[in-house]
Image (cartoon, grey):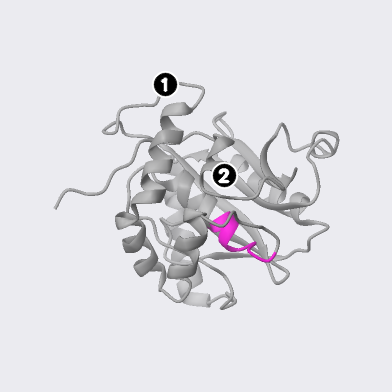
């Protein structure tokens, strides 16, 4: 069976509006990890999306991390919304779903929001069932593809291999989680709070950058108050 593939997505601010998110929240660029640059990011921040290169070093780390967690265990609260990624090039949309789904107490939706319907329908599903549901959920696929075409750069071919990947970082009940649909489970990165979330998330981003010091293809965007 042909795997599901979507067009690669860049961070398009209109995507939130098209999915029916109330404009009280916006995606903004994080221009750097230094305190003076972080001070330019509007507060509060409720999620970070990190775009990073999938390199050999990263894949080695990912395998080791997974084996370590399976051996040692970790706490993941049942309130964390997590879904697997089964659609090629959908990591940007899945990162956005993770960001919104884990902040539903803060975010308002328009009455006809396709994303709200998806979250309502999938709230009791397993991570694998959510992935399968997204494969058939036309409203989000159509919005993703129109957003991919509207990006600032020309959208790559649907068959083009993209070695950049989005993950979401969120604070759920005082714990910072990394949510990556390519992984079997969320990653617990320790304690956080609404006040310290941006700085805590940036420390996780720095670890990604430190693992690949020769790479420049990192980009962070914050879901912040408008």
- Mark 2 residue crowding within 10 angstroms, few (<14) / some (14–19) / many (20+): many
Picture coordinates of residue 214, whole percent (x, y): 55, 30
Count of marks, rendered view: 2
Please report the bounds of the magenta region as a residue range: 98-105
Quadrant assignment for the C terminus: top right
- The residue drawn where x is 78% and y is 39% is 41
Q: Is residue 48 above or below residue 122?
A: above
- Mark 1 residue crowding within 10 angstroms, few (<14) / some (14–19) / many (20+): few
Picture coordinates of residue 213, whole percent (x, y): 59, 34
Which numbered tag is attached to residue 154? 1
Per the image, the residue denoted by label 2 is: 16
Q: Is residue 73 above or below residue 203?
A: below
Q: In the figure, is residue 102 to the left or right of 92? A: right
Q: Is residue 119 above or below residue 18?
A: below
Of tags 2 and 1, which is closer to the observer?
A: 2
Q: Is residue 15 visible?
A: yes
Taking depth in this image into account, of 6 and 60 the one nearest to the observer is 6
Mark earlier in primary sequence (2, 1):
2
Taking depth in this image into account, of 178 and 159 the one nearest to the observer is 159
Taking depth in this image into account, of 29 and 183 the one nearest to the observer is 29
Taking depth in this image into account, of 22 and 196 the one nearest to the observer is 22
């Amino acid at each position: 069976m042909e795997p599901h593939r979507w067009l690669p997505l860049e961070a398009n601010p209109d995507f939130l509006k098209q999915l029916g998110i109330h404009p009280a929240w916006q995606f903004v660029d994080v221009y750097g990890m230094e305190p003076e640059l972080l001070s330019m990011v509007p507060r509060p921040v409720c999620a970070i999306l990190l775009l990073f290169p999938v390199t050999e070093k990263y894949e080695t780390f990912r395998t080791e991390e997974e084996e370590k967690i399976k051996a040692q265990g970790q706490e993941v609260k049942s309130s964390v919304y997590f879904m697997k990624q089964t659609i090629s090039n959908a990591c940007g949309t899945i990162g956005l779903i993770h960001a919104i789904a884990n902040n539903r107490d803060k975010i308002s939706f328009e009455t006809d929001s396709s994303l709200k319907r998806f979250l309502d329908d999938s709230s009791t599903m397993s991570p694998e069932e959510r992935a399968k549901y997204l494969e058939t959920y036309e409203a989000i696929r159509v919005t993703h593809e129109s957003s991919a075409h509207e990006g600032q750069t020309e959208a790559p071919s649907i068959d083009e291999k993209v070695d950049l990947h989005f993950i979401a970082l969120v604070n759920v009940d005082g714990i910072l989680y990394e949510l990556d649909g390519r992984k079997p489970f969320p990653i617990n990165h320790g304690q956080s709070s609404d006040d310290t979330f941006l700085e805590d998330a940036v420390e996780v981003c720095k670890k990604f950058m430190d693992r690949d010091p020769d790479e420049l293809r990192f980009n962070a965007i914050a879901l912040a108050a408008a």
